[in-house]
Amino acid sequence: MAAPLLEVRNLRVEFPTRRGILTALDDVSFSIEPGEILGVVGESGAGKSMTGAAIIGLLEPPGRIARGEILLNGRRIDALPYAELRRIRGREIGAIFQDPLTTLNPLYSVGQQLVETMTTHLPITPDEARRRAIGWLEQVGIPAAAQRIDAYPHEFSGGMRQRVVIALALCAEPKLIVADEPTTALDVSIQAQVIALLKTLARDKGTAMMLITHDMGVIAETADRVAVMYAGRIAEIGPVRQVVLHARHPYSQGLMGSIPPLDRRVERLAQIDGSMPRLTAIPPGCAYNPRCPKVFGRCLGDRPDLMDAGPTQAACWLYDNV
Amino acid sequence: MRRFFDSDLWYSFSRNPVTIVSAIVAILLVAGAVLAPVVAPHNPFDLASLNLMDAFKPPAWTADGDREYPLGTDDQGRDLFSAILYGARISLLVGAAAVLFSTSLGVVVGLAAGYFGGFVDSALMRIADIQLTFPSILVALLVDGVVRAALPREVHDQIALYVVIFAIGISNWPQFARTVRGSTLVERNKEYVQAARVIGISSPRIIFSHVLPNVTGPVLVIATLNLGFAVLAEATLSFLGVGVPPTQPSLGTLIRIGNDFLFSGEWWITIFPGAALVLLVLSVNLLGDWLRDALNPRLR
Amino acid sequence: MFSFVVSRVLQAIPVMLVVAFISFAMFAYVGDPVSIMLGQDFTEAQRTALVHNLGLDRSFLVQFLTFVGNALQGEFGLSYRLGRPVAELIAERAPATLELAFCAAFIAIAIGVPMGVYTGLYRNSWLSRFFLTFSLIGVSLPTFLIGILLILVFAVNLGWLPSFGRGDVVSLGWWSTGFATATGWKALVLPAVTLGLFQLTLIMRLVRAEMLEVLRTDYIKFARARGLSNRAINFGHALKNTLVPVITVAGLQLGAIIAFAIVTETVFQWPGMGLLFIQSVGSADIPVMAAYLMLISAIFVTINLVVDLLYYAVDPRLRVGRRGH
């Protein structure tokens, strides 16, 4: 098998605060193959977005990478000087943010923003860039792209703006897209369209994608593999069918149990008791142990790393001897 | 008390050396001003004790200085140090009274506008907008000029102090009114206020027991920052000769008097009152800045 | 565009009417112009005649409309103090004030904006800290004290620059300018710096605060994620968005400069409108005060209008409907 496009090894992100150092991400490791779509799920605050931000080098200060490395095509990118990191952003890793209403600069027309991105990264003239910009707007499904290219963001609806954002993320032809909750801020009726568009474009261009969401439905439809995050760590990672249908980690099992199935009626959806611990109060041992229905002695003292659990990998002592 | 020392406010205060220093300076200056009759070595207003022979004495540490007068004397032989203490007293009195006046006016207008809305709101805020277009120093000057023209001279001199307080106070209420109106609008639409209305609690009671407590934070910040402004405004008016009467000289008056002797080399008559004024305003502004940042978590 | 301008002009009219009303009320009711103009000895017939001549026996509305009509033609009556037409007095003084205000505004913007941008971008550099400390002192130093200190250093001790007056002026028609002579320029330095310094610190703090606000937004983060250069982000995306609110406040500050010129002109005995105004306040010269108020308001309203137009030019959100969809 070819070398992975992106490899994250033992990533640890810390936030120094008034009351001591908070560990937001701990020992996160995963990889993404070229053209692959990796879904990342978890509750709010589990560290999904933080992982994405660390990869594109946009952690909010005072957050910092304390340990581990991030490799793109085998090259470390987590400690690059700004000038080199800049050439990777947009060119090799594109990003899509949650809220299309705030991610576009209101004072620049969408055409200006597209042209600017392309001329920054690609050896093309502004005229050529403008021609391509119209092409991109057509590809993301903006009607009458040639006329709309000079319109300003406020002249587009939310769904249309997110399509523009997708065009912006793809226009410098990156090999990887980090999409952080790309549909959460949109109307439910639009969400499916935008996800479908994203999936089609990624497949057509052969672009790999890290799709961060808390919507298991989206993951099940779109992703090749899925990583489940809990309290700053990866709880389980594996092929999407396996994780959705045969989750190994008790937390993933709980998470999947809370999705309403379409094929049968259920009286009650399963729910996980309690809530995720705050970063200041992560218990020793497995972070999930206070809520885990299968908790046993070892979970209270030792922290489990990812281990093979059949077709998936799970950070759970249940699979230590498998 | 324990709760206070435990609070975030105290934490941010104790970690901020600049703020601590300005608090100390402000407290020293305010104490010196309030206790001027006790602390000051001389009474600069006791005409009997003034001796023109003592006029224009330079500060004590210079060659011609006199230990009796640590910061020197002015043209009439007044001890400058004592005059500064008494002057700061007038400056602070006028400043504090003016802020109190604009705060009360602004809070009442803001509460009324925010709570009653509709026509009351748009009328009051339109007035505030128009006044905000004009720099407050200009408003204060105009008010002072009009009062001066409207009243006979003797009457005016008697109430000059109140005129200045009124002029500075009236020039600055819109800021308070705007902030309070904003917070009131937010509170008014909250469910507990709606509920209180439905069960028939009277409007004034809702305003004072529910809405008012929620606007104290921002009002306190604006008031602190405005104290610095009001003291400066008073000094400016007095410097221009239209402020407090010469019988009650403030720091601004002292600076104006000293300005006449700048060219003949008696720099200290201007510089020391000026330094006192700057220290006072700077420390108050620093405290205000800190308070604003400390009460506004987003800026942290 | 045209309708936008018209609507802004229409909004300015009530403001001017309110100001005119205040001026008129001052004019008509404060003090007693008749007895001031008549002096000590007069007969009842003289008094009635003067009252009639001044139009004081007509109805309130007629008087107000007459006042507004006269004001529109630049007629504000005679100064009580100097006995000369107010319009003439102000026309004589206006060039001095406007030249001073222009230079002060130039200093404040040309230095204040770059300083604000710098301190916003490089928050923790020692130069930023220095600028910030400087600005705090600037905000706490009253204008007149800055003037006095500058006089003490540059006029009294060093003797480099004059401490009062405008130097030699050259007349260009009714306008007298100090820009044409060396003494005029030298005389301008201290007052312009004095007047500009306070506004400079305000503009710097404002630009810094806005810059920090804008740098926190998602679209700046997204611009970074798109790999744009620092230069394009800071001076293109961030600065342009910062300027939108800055234009408004800077505009208001320019109005404030003309008002604050009162203080600076007093310190430097600068023969402008401000000095005239303060002398009028001191001697209750209502016609001059009323005219000054009207003039200043007209200037403010004009500045606000210009600010709105600039806004329109910078912010496409105000141009909705232009493309008509």
Image: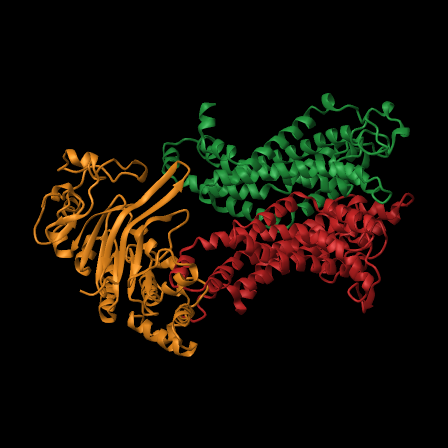
A302 and B119: which is toward the camera: A302
Q: Is residue A83 among what the camera can see?
A: yes
Residue A60 screen position, x and y as percent: 39, 50
User: Along the horizontal axis of the image, is C244 left or right of C184?
Assistant: left
Q: Residue furthest top?
A: B38
B169 and A154: which is toward the camera: A154
C2 and A11: which is toward the camera: A11
What coloring was used for the rendering? by chain
> In the picture, residue A318 is in which quadrant?
top left
**Residue occupying image coordinates x 75% and y 50%:** C264
User: Along the horizontal axis of the image, is B53 left or right of B173?
Assistant: right
Chain identity for the colour orange used in the image: A
Residue A238 screen position, x and y as percent: 16, 54
User: Along the horizontal axis of the image, is A196 left or right of A16?
Assistant: left
Residue C179 screen position, x and y as percent: 77, 65
Q: Is residue C18 among what the camera can see?
A: no
**Residue occupying image coordinates x 10% and y 51%:** A310
**Residue occupying image coordinates x 80% and y 30%:** B60
Chain identity for the colour red used in the image: C
Chain identity for the colour green used in the image: B
User: Along the horizontal axis of the image, is A134 left or right of B183?
Assistant: left
A25 and B219: which is toward the camera: A25
Residue B224 screen position, x and y as percent: 58, 36
| Rendered-image quadrant of the N terminus of chain A | bottom left
> In the picture, residue B20 is in which quadrant?
top right
**Residue occupying image coordinates x 83% and y 59%:** C167
Count of numbered circles on the image:
0
Question: Is the residue C249 above or below the residue B35 in the image?
Answer: below
